[in-house]
Structure formats: C-alpha cells, structure tokens
Amino acid sequence: MGLVSAYQRWKSSFLPENRNVVWSVRTDESGFMLVRRSDAGEECTTFRWKDIIRVHGYKRDCFTVDQIRLVFTFDGGSAIEITEDDEGYKELLLELPKRLYGFPTQQEWWEKVAQPPFATNWIRLFQRVGEQ
C-alpha cells in the first residue's frame, strides 16, 4: 500500500457524512437515551436501567489527553460505550448511583480510572447480582 492510497483513506475520513456528528445522553426514570445528531438528522436509541447487567470504566489514551469511558453491557450481551466528551455525560454520572444499586459515586471510582497516566485502568463499576 502506497503513500497515496493511505492519504486517500485518511482524507475520506473527513467526508461530510463523518462531520458534524454530536453524541449526547439523556436520562429519565426508566433509563437513558443515546442520541446521534448530524446534518442528516437525529437517531435515538433507548436503554432501560433494568437491562444493564454490567458497567466498566476505563481510560483511553488520545495522544494529547486521556478520555474516560464507560462500557454498558445489557441482557443478551449487547454493549455500548459512552465517553466523557458526549453531551449529558456528567448528568449520567449523577444518575448511575441512584438507578443502579451499588454503583459507586464518581468520587469513589474516578481516581482509579484516571491514574496513573497512560494506563488503560479497566475496572468493573457495577455488576447486577446473580450475573457473571
């Protein structure tokens, strides 16, 4: 593979369909909604609190900064990832201890994920009783 084809692949990642995408999270008493907004419109997917069986936190090295991420696993094995750059992330963090029994507050887990620098620091934040 030559330099030209590598450049074309890189350049294609900036095409209009890949621009102007904003992810956000909205919470309510039954669960949360993950919203993808772009120039093409808005797509929403809803997740119920009662379907969450596991939540992990980890840190991703993004070259100049690190990014804290949460991975939610649901009944049936599907999973999604929410990042601290998503709109509504802070509100989600406040809701999780209220909605998921045993979920730690951000003050209880953040340092374990954030430190030391350059380490992934994968930790389990929540697991529904009876699940493995």
Image (tube, grey):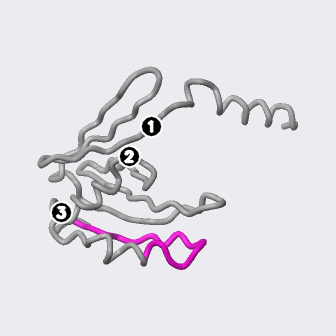
- The three-letter amino acid code for the residue at tag 3 is Leu
Query: Mark number for residue 22?
Result: 1
Disc 2 to disc 3, how far (Cα)?
21 Å
Query: Mark number for residue 100?
Result: 3
User: Residue pushed farthest left?
Assistant: 29
Of circles 1 and 3, the one toward us is 1
User: Vertically, is 131 above or below 4?
Assistant: below
Q: Residue at x 69, y 29 (%)?
A: 12
| Residue 38: % across, % down | 45, 28
Q: Are marks 1 and 3 in contact (CB under 8 Å)?
A: no
What residue sits right under mark 2 in the picture?
Answer: 87
Badge 1 marks a residue whose secondary structure is strand
Few, some or many residues within 10 Å of mark 2 (<14, 14–19, 20+): some
| Residue 51: % across, % down | 19, 51
Few, some or many residues within 10 Å of mark 1 (<14, 14–19, 20+): some
Which span of residues is magenta-colored? 112-127
The image quarter containing residue 22 is top left
Disc 1 to disc 3, how far (Cα)?
26 Å
Of circles 2 and 3, the one toward us is 2
Disc 1 to disc 2, how far (Cα)?
8 Å
Task: Based on the picture, tell me whether residue 113 belongs to the magenta stretch.
Answer: yes
Q: Are marks 1 and 2 in contact (CB under 8 Å)?
A: yes
- The three-letter amino acid code for the residue at tag 1 is Val
Q: Earlier in the sequence, mark 2 or mark 3?
A: 2
Query: Mark number for residue 37?
Result: none
Quarter of the image containing the N terminus?
A: top right
- The three-letter amino acid code for the residue at tag 2 is Glu
Tell which of 71 and 113 is nearer to you: 113
Quarter of the image containing the C terminus?
A: bottom left
